[in-house]
Image: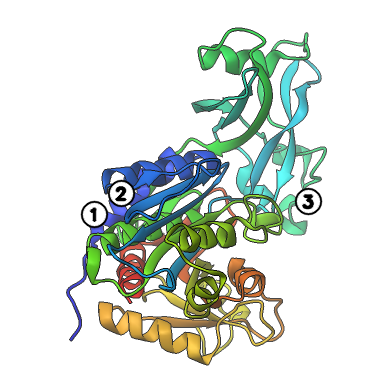
Amino acid sequence: MSEPPRFDRGHTDDLMSFLAASPTPYHAVVNAAERLEKAGFRQVAETDAWDGSSGGKYVLRGGAIIAWYVPEGAPAHTPFRIVGAHTDSPNLRVKPRPDSGAHGWRQVAVEIYGGPLLNSWLDRDLGLAGRLSLRDGSTRLVNVDRPLLRVPQLAIHLDRSVNADGLKLDKQRHMQPVWGMGGDVRDGDLIAFLEETAGLPSGEVTGWDLMVHSVEPPAYLGRDRELVAGPRMDNLLSVHAGTAALTAAAGRGTGLSHIPVLAAFDHEENGSQSDTGADGPLLGGVLERSVFARGGSYEDRARAFAGTVCLSSDTGHAVHPNYAERHDPTHHPRIDGGPILKVNVNNRYATDGSGRAVFAAACEKADVPFQSFVSNNAMPCGTTIGPITAARHGIRTVDIGVAILSMHSARELCGANDPFLLANALVAFLEG
Ligand code: ZN
């Protein structure tokens, strides 16, 4: 018997607020933590000694969050059920000496983070947000969520062949945003502006991780408002659904035979190799400490890991009406057709047949339809944190997600129903 779905359009409304409030991974994990706190989860510090108490807990590290719920009396060898996702999205990030300019313009020097569709960043009203590191060793989040910057496109009159030949953008020369006029550019102007914005004394900021974002809020779109346009769906859509699913599963309390976990990592878009990325020890360390804190031995740790399953949730490609030939002819994932199972026999995705069965069971229990994605053989296949999680921790992993259009654009497009269909499937999975 399938249980009634728990999430509906209200979940999508909340996703839109989450996207708007999370211009950076640092903001995303704080907003996820805020939702977890409301559900009774408590932050634990990695530098403290951990106890074996039950209940919801989470670890925050930079742009990553690991949250889990220990049911009352769970033995140390209890396996985990993990929803994995990533918090970062391709964008433009501020360089160490940001203050630049030419011909009377003030500009901000930026690097390109990950693989954005560069054209999608042109002629947008852009804000600036991120993390400021202060003299006393603390950090402060900052978000200038108003039109502050713009990467202006060259007028067609000065680039007559652009529509016929395509737009060619040089990452160094053509992507530097302007943020006003004033020819006299001085080192330290941008950081001084941010100190002032954040109400900090001058000279207080000694380090920064800053990135630009579109200030246009997410919006329902379409004749019947059946679509959602917005930024960073890849992959905050999964982070948000995973957070909602974990709090719902935790609400079931002692009835769980697994420990449900949300693992949201930073740095997926550039290979996951960092202390907050999926290819680091963060997840394994947290899970192990949870086993040992409950009095477990290495044997208990091995038993728990052997029974653990991870659903790696990330966005995938819905079939595009103008480019349907880019897909495999018999696999055409549709917007609002339900979550997608992602398959690649060369392990760009971690799914195998037994993983499909795990996901199919969760969808059946949640009464959610699902679709399959596999690449056209002539197209290179993307990848996710799935194969990394499987290989690094020896954890059985299944790649799934939601089909969207315009992946890696500054403004992506998804269905209004898929986010809550995914959340319902994730709850069924986490409840085991
Ligand atoms: Zn992604």
The structure residue drawn at horizontal position 47% and vertical position 44%, both measured from the top left corner, is 28
Marks 3/1 in contact by CB < 8 Å: the verdict is no
Q: Identify the mark nearer the N-term, 3 or 1.
A: 1
Residue under label 1: 10
> From the viewer's perspective, is 271 left or right of 81?
right
Which amino acid, by three-letter code, is at mark 1? Gly
Residue under label 2: 14
How far apart in space, not on screen, are marks 3 and 1 (Cα)? 41 Å
Residue 244's spot in the image, x, y percent? 32, 57
The structure residue drawn at horizontal position 43% and vertical position 49%, both measured from the top left corner, is 58
Q: Identify the mark nearer the N-term, 2 or 3.
A: 2
How far apart in space, not on screen, are marks 2 and 3 (Cα)? 37 Å
Which amino acid, by three-letter code, is at mark 3? Lys
Q: Where's the N terminus, which quadrant?
A: bottom left
Q: Residue 224: in sight, yes or no? A: no
Please say if 260 is above or below 171.
below
Choose mark 2 or mark 3, whichever is in front. 2
Residue 220's spot in the image, x, y percent? 33, 52
Residue under label 3: 168
Report helix, strand or loop for mark 1: helix
Residue 348's spot in the image, x, y percent? 66, 77
Residue 402's spot in the image, x, y percent? 45, 68
How far apart in space, not on screen, are marks 1 and 2 (Cα)? 6 Å
